[in-house]
Image (cartoon, helix red, strand yellow):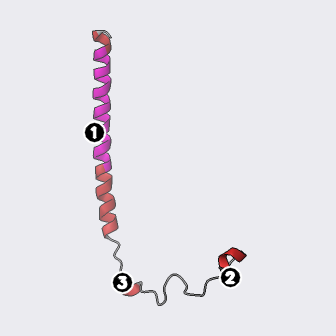
Amino acid sequence: MGLEQISSVVQTNAATAEESAASSEELSGQASILESLIAQFKLARELYEPSEPAVASESPAEPSSMYEKY
């Protein structure tokens, strides 16, 4: 590999690193915005207290095969 090729690869890597840093900074800013928006939503326990469990406590269905009976 010649010196020109090495230089080209180094330049490409540097450009990619700069793009990655810019993307990371942008994502960090968006995460901060999202975090502040989520903080606005508060869950009040008194509003969400189910009177019954989510899973019904009915008796199990009949077995589908004769082997499940035993």
| Identity, as a three-letter code, of the amino acid under mark 1 | Ala
Q: Is residue 18 above or below residue 40?
A: above
Residue ID at (66%, 76%): 68
- Determine crowd level at label 1: few under 14, some 14-19, many 20+ residues with C-alpha closer than 10 A: few
Residue 20 falls within the magenta-colored stretch: yes
* Secondary structure of the residue carrying numbered label 3: helix
What range is drawn magenta here? 6-27
Give x and y (percent) for residue 16.
32, 31
* Residue that numbered label 3 is attached to: 45
Instruction: Tell me the quadrant of the picture where the N terminus can be found.
Output: top left
Outermost residue, front side: 70
Query: According to the image, label 2 marks what residue?
Result: 62
- The quadrant holding residue 48 is bottom left
Provide the residue designation for mark 1.
21
Seen from this angle, which residue lies furthest bottom? 51
Q: Secondary structure at mark 1?
A: helix
* Separation (CA) of disc 2 from disc 3: 38 Å
